[in-house]
Amino acid sequence: MKIVEASGFEFQFTDAMDAFIFDEKDHSKPTFHGAPMKSVDIIAEFPAAYVYVELKNYADATIYDPLDADTRAQQDKFNWLKNYLKYKFRDSYLYRHAEHKVEKPVHYLCLLTFDNALNSRIQKSLKQELPVGRVTSRWAQALATSCQVVNLDKWNENFPKWPVTRLSTI
């Protein structure tokens, strides 16, 4: 079992070969990459796949919800978040490509502290832009095999072999 603590959460990857903080800030750690690109918070490696995990712990989801938008600014914030998540994945993929670590399918999981409806809207938009599961005639493989955006409850429901708990804030 690999246990990883990040952004106020503890993940237990029971069947992982490896799992680590990919967005490492400590220069002395072997997983520090130091290039000026974005990166997902955690990468877990399994025999048949890699899982990229991005975490966002927001107190107020309404500022990102385009259905609650009173102004164009809220739609802009939704688009900003979707693009931020997209580029975190893409830059991480580039890092891993440079490490020769994209030979397995890659799954992108975002744990956001939003309700299911907003997470679903983000997921739908994100899947279109990554692109998930789509390969052009010139590609040898898809960038992302799957993409899911879930909250803590849905994570634990969908991935019971990888339970997540919120760490105490005191």
Image (cartoon, rainbow, N blue to C red):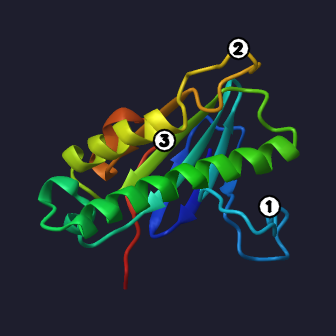
- Judged from the image, the secondary structure of the residue bearing numbered disc 3 is loop
- Judged from the image, the secondary structure of the residue bearing numbered disc 2 is loop
* Mark pair 2, 1: CA separation: 34 Å
The answer to whether the residues at label 3 and label 2 have Cβ atoms under 8 Å apart is no
Query: Which residue appears at 38% of the width and 56% of the height?
Result: 79
Residue named by callout 3: 162
Q: Earlier in the sequence, mark 2 or mark 1?
A: 1
Query: Which residue appears at 28% of the width and 40% of the height?
Result: 120
Which is in the foreground here, disc 2 or disc 1? 2
Viewed as shown, does residue 3 lie left or right of 141?
left
Residue named by callout 2: 137
Res 99 → quadrant: top right
Query: Which residue appears at 50% of the width and 38% of the height?
Result: 129
Residue type at numbered disc 2: Ser
Res 80 → quadrant: bottom left
- Judged from the image, the secondary structure of the residue bearing numbered disc 1 is loop
Q: Nearer the viewer, residue 114 or 74?
A: 74
Res 103 → quadrant: top right
- Where 143 sits versus 115, above or below? above
Which is in the foreground here, disc 3 or disc 1? 1
- Where 71 sits versus 159, above or below? below
Residue named by callout 1: 31
Q: Mark yes or no: residue 7 visible.
A: yes
Q: Nearer the viewer, residue 105 or 30?
A: 105
Q: Nearer the viewer, residue 10 or 155?
A: 155
* Mark pair 3, 1: CA separation: 21 Å
Q: Residue furthest top?
A: 137
